[in-house]
Image: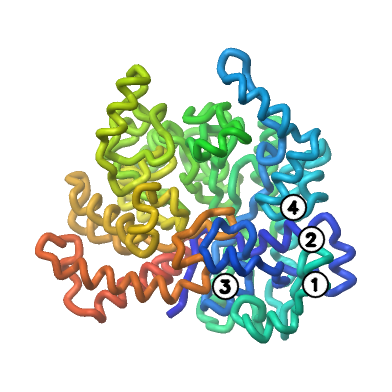
Amino acid sequence: MKFSDLHTHNHMRAHFWMQENPDHFERKGSFSPWTVISSNRKGYLKGKMGASYSQADLVKAWNAKVRLSFNSLYPLERQFVKGYKPVVGEDKWYRFLIGFATSHKLPLRDLIQTAYMRIPDEAVDYFQSKDYDYWESLQREMAFVTRDSGKRIAKNEIFTPGLFRRIFESEKRRRAKLADENEALNAQYLVPTNRKELLASLDNEEEITMVLTVEGAHALGTDRASIAEISRRVQTLKTDWKTPVFFITFAHHFDNSLCGHAHSIPDVGKLLLDQRKNRNAGFNANGLRIARELLGLNKALEKDETLGYRILLDVKHMSAQSRKDYYEHIVLPCLQKGDVIPVIGSHCGYSGRKSLDQHIALQDSERDDYCELCGDESKLSKTKRAALIAKQPKGKFNAWNINLCDEDIELILKTGGLFGLSFDQRILGLKSSDAESRNGIELLWDNIDGIAKSAYANPNLTDVQKASVWKCMTIGTDYEGLIDPPNPYPSVLEFPLFAGNLIFEIEKTRKKPDANHLHFLQSREDSERLVADFCFRNAENFVKQHFPK
């Protein structure tokens, strides 16, 4: 079976490690997206958060039969490496103490970043410096990713960080003992520049088709550039880059000056990271302008050839209010005119909520272990809130507004869009109370099953649209995005295991008398075809339909 991934970062670890010293790696012949950064084997085996080990580098992807990768370019947001600045009147005293101790001007911050993100100190220093520019970083990342496109390599290189490890660890032994993790032979990827190349690459079983995407509109330099310059940069992507950008994940973890982002950082992370500015806000006028221009639309929402090809928008990380604005101001008016803009959620979970308005009303209640059955606690006293939480039954899904609700799913189906299922435990709804019982295929299947049931129960959808839900879901792991995956699936190498487990879950569920959303499955072979669609064909058909050139 072949696999695709709607949201991944195949090059991320290699780029982080080599970007600040490219000449050194060039001399060694290892400045390449194919170079494996040696992983922490214990972290990999335990399925820990993907910082100490690689989840989706090109070698693993090649050996796992990933043959379609939507590889996301992401200039790291500086808020990840800059000090937290507490606000008088809003933050408690200990936040000021932590903020001082972890300032980016003190060595403790660098130690935390290098230990947590496992990137070299010189890269952290660069990200913290005034010289770090998102737009320039995006150009460098694109050049790195495309440098070996179309080149067949005989064998990849391996780089082992740290002098001690390089002395005492044998790369030769790693290759021999753990070949799938460390060695790709006679391998090739292609970043297609046009539809003809895309179709030929998809037909070539001996090549990874790599479609470029961008994570975060901040990559356009929205923190420094004027709106006119940001607009010019959108056109630069379309005219100067040989390889088209397929979609852009418009929001990310922090303010991009264009639209509000969803709450995404768990409670412990808030001690070091501050995403309050414009969190849960909506689009502003400049944001709607840039969204239209990415989509090739003028103010009247008409296609304008002078604005170039259409770069689709991914709604992951948009706040519920931003998604509502995007649908009301762009997607729905265009749909009424016959211009169908597919809604993409590239690496999401299902929230269990009915509507965006429910998400907006309850967004201030979001906390760790928050599930879809929780009510609005924002106006309750501490005592009453604690009592409500204690009595609250635990649902299956993570109800933070970063996840997609029934209204989002409806729009995905009406526009022929695509839902990419994240492989992040927290996004999928794993809570501390069920960390052992659901940390596997159950977690992923609950989300797939919940999305399908949402579609089949929606009175606003036709029978054809309801059935199309099985063509609108695919894998969207967010591997290499520092996620904590379900323990059995720490990397792409476990995709075949996941597929087999998913077939088993579907077979078990379809035989239940109330499984109306699986009524069309009559045999195991039908279930196998459904899983093959989810793992590859749905994404393949989508990119064939919407590739811009």
Percent from the top left, x then y, of residue 253? Answer: 56, 40
Mark 1 Cα shell of 10 Å, populated few (<14), some (14-19), many (≥20): some
Query: Which circle, 4 or 1, is nearer the viewer?
Result: 1
Amino acid bearing label 4: Gln
First-in-chain label (1 vs 2): 2
Instruction: Give the residue pinned by disc 4.
Output: 139
- What SS does tag 2 mark? helix
Labels 1 & 2 near each other (Cβ < 8 A): yes
Amino acid bearing label 1: Ser
First-in-chain label (2 vs 3): 2
Mark 4 Cα shell of 10 Å, populated few (<14), some (14-19), many (≥20): some
First-in-chain label (1 vs 3): 1
Query: Which circle, 4 or 2, is nearer the viewer?
Result: 2
- Residue lying furthest left in this view? 513
Instruction: Give the residue pinned by disc 2.
Output: 18
Q: CA distance from mark 3 to mark 4?
A: 24 Å
Q: Residue at x 58, y 29 (%)?
A: 286
Percent from the top left, x then y, of residue 126? Answer: 81, 45
Labels 4 & 1 near each other (Cβ < 8 A): no
Q: CA distance from mark 2 to mark 3?
A: 20 Å
Q: Residue at x 27, y 58 (%)?
A: 449
Q: CA distance from mark 4 to mark 1?
A: 20 Å
For residue 344, say whether it is visible: no
Instruction: Give the residue pinned by disc 3.
Output: 61
